[in-house]
Amino acid sequence: MRTSIATVCLSGSLTEKLTAAARAGFDGVEIFENDLLASPLTPEEVRARCADLGLTIDLYQPMRDIEAVPADLLAANLRRARRKFELMNRLGADTVLVCSSVSPQAVDDDALAADHLTQLADLAQDFGVRVAYEALAWGRHVSTYDHAWRIVEAADHPALGTCLDSFHILSRGTDPKAIEDIPGEKIFFLQLADAPLLAMDVLQWSRHYRCFPGQGGFDVAHLVRHVLRAGYTGPLSLEVFNDVFRQADAGPTAVDAHRSLLVLRESVGLADLPAPVVPTGIAFAELTTPDAEPVTSVLAALGFTRTARHRSKPVDLWQQGEARVLVNTGPAARRDGTGLAAIGLESPDPAAAARRAEALLAPVLPRRRAPEDAPLDAVAAPDGTELFFCAADHPELPGWRGDFEDIRAAADGAVITRVDHLALTQPWHHFDEAALFHRSVLGLRAQESVDVADPYGLLRSRAVTDTEERVRIVLSVGAAPADDTVHAQHIALATSDIVAAARRFRAAGGRLLAMPANYYDDLAARFDLPEGELATFRDLGILYDRDAQGEFRHCYTQTVGRVFFELVQRDGGYRGYGAQNAPVRLAAQHGARRLTGG
Amino acid sequence: MRTSIATVCLSGSLTEKLTAAARAGFDGVEIFENDLLASPLTPEEVRARCADLGLTIDLYQPMRDIEAVPADLLAANLRRARRKFELMNRLGADTVLVCSSVSPQAVDDDALAADHLTQLADLAQDFGVRVAYEALAWGRHVSTYDHAWRIVEAADHPALGTCLDSFHILSRGTDPKAIEDIPGEKIFFLQLADAPLLAMDVLQWSRHYRCFPGQGGFDVAHLVRHVLRAGYTGPLSLEVFNDVFRQADAGPTAVDAHRSLLVLRESVGLADLPAPVVPTGIAFAELTTPDAEPVTSVLAALGFTRTARHRSKPVDLWQQGEARVLVNTGPAARRDGTGLAAIGLESPDPAAAARRAEALLAPVLPRRRAPEDAPLDAVAAPDGTELFFCAADHPELPGWRGDFEDIRAAADGAVITRVDHLALTQPWHHFDEAALFHRSVLGLRAQESVDVADPYGLLRSRAVTDTEERVRIVLSVGAAPADDTVHAQHIALATSDIVAAARRFRAAGGRLLAMPANYYDDLAARFDLPEGELATFRDLGILYDRDAQGEFRHCYTQTVGRVFFELVQRDGGYRGYGAQNAPVRLAAQHGARRLTGG
């Protein structure tokens, strides 16, 4: 089944949009009228450019307020339509979208609408054009797909069919089942969009908040299954109006868009992608830094031991329990500063995991960095983080650990047991993309987004995990594009005794982030905590949360470059990340940064 | 009547917020709990800081989910409340906000709610604290102000009153008239917010889109009049949750906030501000540029003549008809590049206009630049544009023109008659502020905002004019903070013959912005224009729009620095600015910039 994308989904000039769509692998485009009007290319040049890029022009749109109008208006509409059909012939586009009328002059008369659409279809037929009539969710008299279909059915014209749009159908909560009653050959086009579940005016919702399938809250796949059962064989075409995508680079947006359709095709049984291989643990987190000392002194104070060194590269392995941190002082670090650059994911089948990632358009990284290194399967996440798929429980497979030469065993008495979660800051435009990537490529599950108040704006945050929560990645994004080092990546380390871990860290010279006294007064007001424990929390800067399932204690180290560490103690079934405490933590980090002039 | 502002309205740490509020002239603050929790200052230090700044702490907030709950929850709530009352004693705050319960455990029982609030008020009284009970618009059982008042009335406790919030009342469309039935002394607090009229979930609307009175669509003044008639004597306090303000600098936001309250006080008869002096024309537009040649060659090609030179400064006057452009190559230009830096507004009473501006917190500029210059009344707009109030029809008053020495008379045969409008690009955070400034300070009227699609994002645009449209200023802002020179300021020049004006410009070597051929094909499809006129439009890059009132023709020069010129011909009663054509014009400007490598 072919894939297509409306030019309105992407940012830039028409040629930039076409190039991005073709590079991302789309078969065709819907050309949005405003994009053509604003383009210096003639229709013939647009047609040639599309042909060069291997793109068909699947739809030209829109025509508005055509049907069920007074006679003089109809005459003007048909005159205008003739010009557009001539234009479509020059473009080589054979299907035009007609949206149900929103004009105050339109009358509520299905027979009249059918008659006018018949006249339009007669004219279209002369030009070899097909008219696809679509119910806008806010159409004046026609706002549901079944109503639009009844009019098309009544008109009974070979050049007239219907266009289905998942947003217009699902935003109204209409059951898509009756789609199956429409003959497939009369469904001339299918436009797909998802959207977050917002309670707002449907026109505003549609114009500003649509997103790609799988990024929102609609069950788009369910709708598509009905359309396929109806016998539809045209393209799956994305039509997304989104304020953020309008500003984002067209290239990554187009890749993101195409990935969403690949996942959708898979979920309706149309694509045979390699199955997801869900990671079973975090093998390592890799920090790059131009100067190892500040990071390794924090690691040492946390109780990590330098246990191994890479055979050919300036990379050290620091370990404690099952928590492993690679410290890489190679060339990239000198360019990018101190940051969380890569994640090693334990995988039951690294090669299959990489095949799925590649099929879903993730850039595959070179498998082998030096001739003697083990070939590792790795891809880049949308934010540039390198994801290495590491063989778990397969000693026969080449492993990342084999590239390292042991220095010494990890110290006894580990209080840190494993990586609890990794937090990655996403580029402003690519938050929804990141969640869809981690879900579809890695087979992780996304939790609900939460808004967190930072003193200087709102943050959005969303966790992705496997069902057993062995792998937890928290994605966050600021409210606006800003280079703010407080919104840093971090490595959260699990301990069963946060007080002991924090005390050891401080005794070893580590600096814990101090929390304000007012926070602890509030904690005392909210929870009936023993006074001694409260005093300990206050002393160490430990934050506390509790829900119906369990308890959460956490504290933070100072920030090095763009990275800090968190100590985390989970008791009972607490599954969150202390979002309640995030505003206080963020304010403390802003304050610490001001003090150090950072 | 005292003014107050909730700390949640402003960005930054608590101390930054307090400083900004005090500098803007507020008498007091509402302290939002999260701001205190995140602050390293003790409550006593916050109290002392407020006292130093001359601020009272008028409200501490919020307490939530207190009333009409099961007994064990009430006990925990009262325990928590005691801690908060102790805290309020340390802060020196004597009023606490209690929001109507949203808890799923709350029961629909007014008598129980009154009983629980009585218990809370008993406790509060021991600490000298007053409890102000407010109906949240989305409260579980109590969501209207009259319902909240009935419960307060039933409780009949001296330490219990009600808090009114304009958002919660007006967002539900409730008639505020019954406020007058509440005894004024039982209205413990009044919180004010405006909001744009959005059809969306009221909780989301409230949390993200509130704005200061006069910036949105509510009739806040109408509500306040009812509250005053009820006998309320407490502060007018702003409580605004807004995603943009959360990121904007606290200083300008606080000034904007205070201005909105000053205007509100004026409109309810509580403040005696100097009356607005509406400008009656545009005396001049002043461009600064480090290199006069590129700008003056455009002006000369447009038919302007250099008619005068400033006696003491490097400023030339270029004139044609009643359109006057000052070209300033003074020191500021070397810093800021080529831009629209100042506007001369013809004013029936310049001194009174400046007095009103000053009373409304506009920075007053030095009245005299050099000893021999005429003393001019001038203020800075929020975007930094200097506004000069110039005496109109008062030859006895000192005038800006007197500082200029004539060089020669303007050429005959002017085709440009006047400045049609001036377009100013606003800093991202201050769009609503700008509209309120121009309305309240200058007495202009704001038209509706329009969204315009730029190839790289959406723009918002809003015109402010006097009733006779002698002064038109168009304010616009991009969708996100970005330094984009395409979103430039411009000077639109009125002509009664745009074809002649454009031809003359081109004949004199000027470059007109070319528009794509597809635009003209669409124009032919939309309007029945004579073929000859269409060919002329196409040749000269003239854009066309028509509405029920009249016609609009306009075209654009190339951009110099951050400025370009527009030629405008209005026929009939057309009062818009060709927003329909803006996407095509913006795309053409992006294209031209790419070609010139700008």
Image: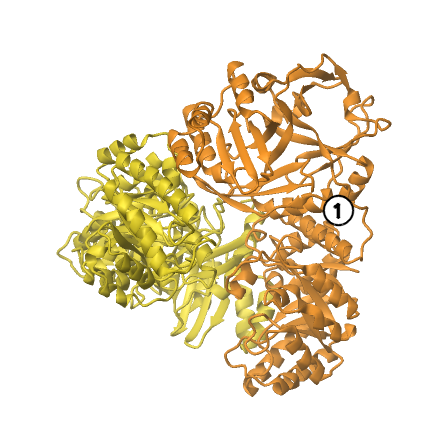
Chain colours: A yellow, B orange
Q: Residue at x 29, y 68 (%)?
A: A468
Residue A549, placed above or below residue B278: below
Judging by the rendered image, the residue that carries numbered circle 1 is: B360
User: How many marks on residues?
Assistant: 1
Q: Position of residue B557 (x, y in %)?
A: 52, 24
Q: Position of residue A250 (x, y in %)?
A: 35, 41
| Nearer the observer, B35 or A225 | A225
Corner quadrant of residue B381: top right
**Residue A554 shown left or right of residue B367 in the figure:** left
Q: Position of residue A189 (x, y in %)?
A: 26, 52
Q: Residue furthest top?
A: B408
Residue A115, placed above or below residue A72: below
Residue A331, placed above or below residue B287: below
Q: Residue at x 36, y 46 (%)?
A: A62
Mark 1 chain = B
Instruction: Give the amino acid at mark 1.
Output: Leu
Q: Is residue B82 visible?
A: no
**Residue B132 shown left or right of residue A207 in the figure:** right
Q: Residue at x 37, y 40 (%)?
A: A80
| Nearer the observer, A525 or A164 | A164
| Nearer the observer, B435 or B207 | B435
Q: Residue furthest left?
A: A396
Q: Residue furthest right?
A: B396
Question: Helix, strand or loop at disc 1?
Answer: loop
**Neighbours of disc 1 within 10 Å: few (<14), some (14-19), many (20+):** many
Q: Is residue B75 visible?
A: yes
Q: Position of residue A23 (x, y in %)?
A: 26, 39
